[in-house]
Image (cartoon, grey):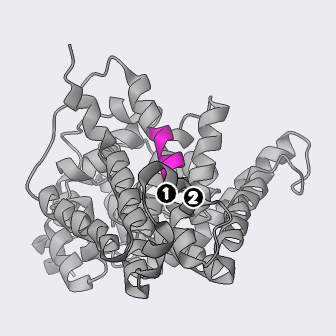
Amino acid sequence: MQSIWAYARFAFINVFQIAFIGFLLMGGAWMWAGLAMTASFVICDELFEDQRDRHYEHPGVLLALLYLNLPTMLAMSAIFAFYLGDTDPLHLAVLAERTLGMDLVANRAATSASDLMAAGVIIALVYGSAGINAAHELSHRTHSVVDQAVARWLLAFTCDTTFPIEHVHGHHKHVGTAGDPATARRGEYVLAFMVRSTVGCFVNAFAIERKRLAAMGKPVWSPANRALRGQLMSLIYVAAFYWLAGWLGVAVFGALAINGKMYLEAVNYIEHYGLVRVPGRPIRARHSWDCYQAVSSTFLYNLTRHANHHVHSRHAFWEITVEPTAPRMPHGYMLMILASFVPAIWRRFTAAGLENWDLDLASEAERREMAQRGWTPAGPQFAAAE
């Protein structure tokens, strides 16, 4: 009998959201509790690793945990929008009073702007981590209409509903090559990468969809265009925030969406930074950075085992295994993301790994590819040869 822990650990992000909904309902200084919990996660992430491969006998349980992100994120967003406005069109105060004995209107009055900002940081983080990572997993389940729909509604929180199109049909085909906007170039600053990747992936998604529709004999401007329909999904969330909190709600939703999207792009940045693949060559474990820190792996549905995900992109997150030959990140995702914003620290964190990749993992063809891009491979012998 498989242990309950094997399944329950992937519910941590759901439990975190439910706990944070409780903090939101209590208002005031409780809004800061989410930040305190997140800080503890960063610390714990550096203390524990998990390289065990497991077989799951009841994958439906894990799939249900992915679906659970949508209702919790909707509830979180609705309560947060209530605090931004001065009305209550959803009658949340009445519901809270009847079910929890809680005076939500009084809690709103006791909540300061700084309290709301603290809560907004966590909500954006949830949009960009729980929402996007659950959507990432579901978007690979291209055989399921339900999974595709849930994925896109999750991604609509970050106005990134074109992600399933470009990610599945673009990034997984071109990863590591110069033609992949989601692969960070060596020496590229994370904010510059975010802009390039966001624009490039958006343009590519529309190009992929245009080609698909042309093959079906349908025009680009039609209801069959998934990229266009996705923009309407995001607009529905914008309209909902306007209904609940007016133009302030719209502005805040925009800020949350941008910050959530930045989290996704920061993850993209660290997952393939500085690695190279020759176009047309097979995707190998060496073309993605792996990370086996327990908290990162648990909260992000094994996304951290990124090498195996790219080698076997049809595998569900519970089927992803450790790749012994993949390059390793020196720290967990949370710390690596923070480090990416400080170039001096980022270079220190990545120097040894890039040198090992250049000397021991890269093929001769990949070293030539680096030379064509104007990159000097790491290592003392290459530096001496300059």
Q: Which residue is mark 1?
A: 97
Q: Quadrant of residue 47?
A: bottom left
Check residue 227 for magenta coloring: no
Let me know if residue 72 is in the magenta part.
yes
Q: Amino acid at mark 2?
A: Val
Quadrant where the image shows the N terminus: top left
Amino acid type of the residue tagged 1 in the rendering: Glu
Crowdedness of circle 1 by 10 Å Cα count: few (<14), some, many (20+)? few
Residue 179 against residue 281 in the figure, above or below: below
User: Foreground residue, 287 or 267?
Assistant: 267
Report which quarter residue 2 is drawn in: top left
Which percent across, then down, holds residue 4? 22, 26
Of residues 12 and 384, the one nearer the viewer is: 12
Query: Does residue 169 appear anywhere in the picture?
Result: no
Residue designated by label 2 = 94
How many labels, in total? 2
Q: Is residue 76 above or below residue 110?
A: above
Sort mark 2 into few (<14), some (14-19) or many (20+) by Cα contacts within 10 Å.
some
Q: Position of residue 280 (x, y in %)?
A: 51, 47
> Does the magenta stretch mainly form a helix, a strand or a loop?
helix
Please identify the quadrant where the C terminus is shown. Answer: bottom left
318 or 82, which is in the foreground? 82
Task: Say left or right for 47 vs 81.
Answer: left
Q: Residue furthest top?
A: 1
Identify the element where label 2 is drawn: helix
Q: Who's the residue at 87% across and 49% down the image?
A: 223
- Quadrant location of residue 276? bottom left
Marks 2 and 1 in Cβ contact (< 8 Å): yes
x and y percentages locating residue 314 in the rendered image: 47, 32
Where are the magenta residues, as a range?
Answer: 66-73
* Residues at marks 2 and 1, CA–CA distance in whole angstroms: 5 Å
Mark 1 residue element = helix
